[in-house]
Image (cartoon, grey):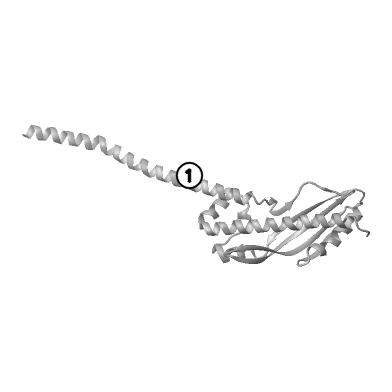
Amino acid sequence: MSKRYSIKSGLLIFGLFFLTPIFIFSQESKKEKKERDAQEKFDKEYNEWKQRLGSYPLTRKEGIVTFEFIDSILVKGKTKGDLVVAFKTSLSDVLKEAKSAIDIEDKDAGLVIAKVTDNMSYEWNNKSTLHSLKYSLKFLAKEDKFRLQLTDIAIAEENTLYYSVLKVPVKYSSLDPQASDDELKGLYKKLSNKQREFIITVRKAMVKHLGVVHEALGLMIIKKTQDTF
């Protein structure tokens, strides 16, 4: 009887000695897998959100946010002077509800920079909302062509706008897909899905508004070059 007991005890000790590490390893593996799956899910969702944010592009150079079309617009038979006049007279026609003022004008270089305070609109919670947007219009003319750039873009009182919905301090720089990934990812972690959608909504509204201004000004300048100055 004691011999059988000894054998059973030995087998039990043997089992505990060899199987316990396997059990512990199995439990740790499950935990690691769960953590890995959660991280992969987070990374996938974050990258999709970042891609959506980046689908409304704004470039950033030395901290300045810019919206532009690289190609120059051709207007045959017009001098730099003609194009500068067309740009200046187009401002009031296109930006009727905005405030604009000439900041820099160099006729010889064909350069004009105007400061603009405008309003962009966006839909949120089934309501249309206006918010102030500031930017500079940089117009550069050469013989027979011109380029128009919207630069130094900033949301007026951006912290107030974002904090009203996000309830966390946000700087526009952290919403730039070209900014550091750690900064953008750190913000993403703090936000709910609804808050993340709000950021996309604001970015989309900005780019849409700037695109409309750019196109309208370009077309108006072309139209005015066909008029008699």
Q: Position of residue 143 (x, y in %)?
A: 90, 48
How many numbered marks does the figure carry? 1
Which of 127 and 113 lies nearest the eye of the viewer? 127
Residue in the picture at 30% in, 37% down: 22
Q: Quadrant of residue 100?
A: bottom right
Q: Quadrant of residue 115?
A: bottom right
Q: Quadrant of the N terminus?
A: top left
Residue in the picture at 58% in, 65% down: 126
Residue 180 in view: no
The kind of secondary structure element at disc 1 is helix
Q: Position of residue 61 (x, y in %)?
A: 70, 50
- Is 39 on the left or on the right of 56, as rendered? left
Q: Residue furthest left?
A: 1
What residue is disc 1 on?
A: 40
Which of 186 and 43 lies nearest the eye of the viewer? 43
Q: In the displayed structure, would residue 116 be above or below residue 64?
A: below
Residue in the picture at 53% in, 59% down: 194
Of the residues shown, which amino acid type is indicated by label 1?
Glu
Residue 99 in view: yes
Q: Quadrant of the C terminus?
A: bottom right
Q: Position of residue 106 (x, y in %)?
A: 87, 56
- Is 118 on the left or on the right of 194, as rendered? right
Q: Quadrant of residue 29?
A: top left
Q: Position of residue 198 (x, y in %)?
A: 58, 59
**Category of crowding for the residue at label 1, using alpha-carbon neighbours closer than 10 angstroms: few (below 14), some (14–19), many (at least 20):** few
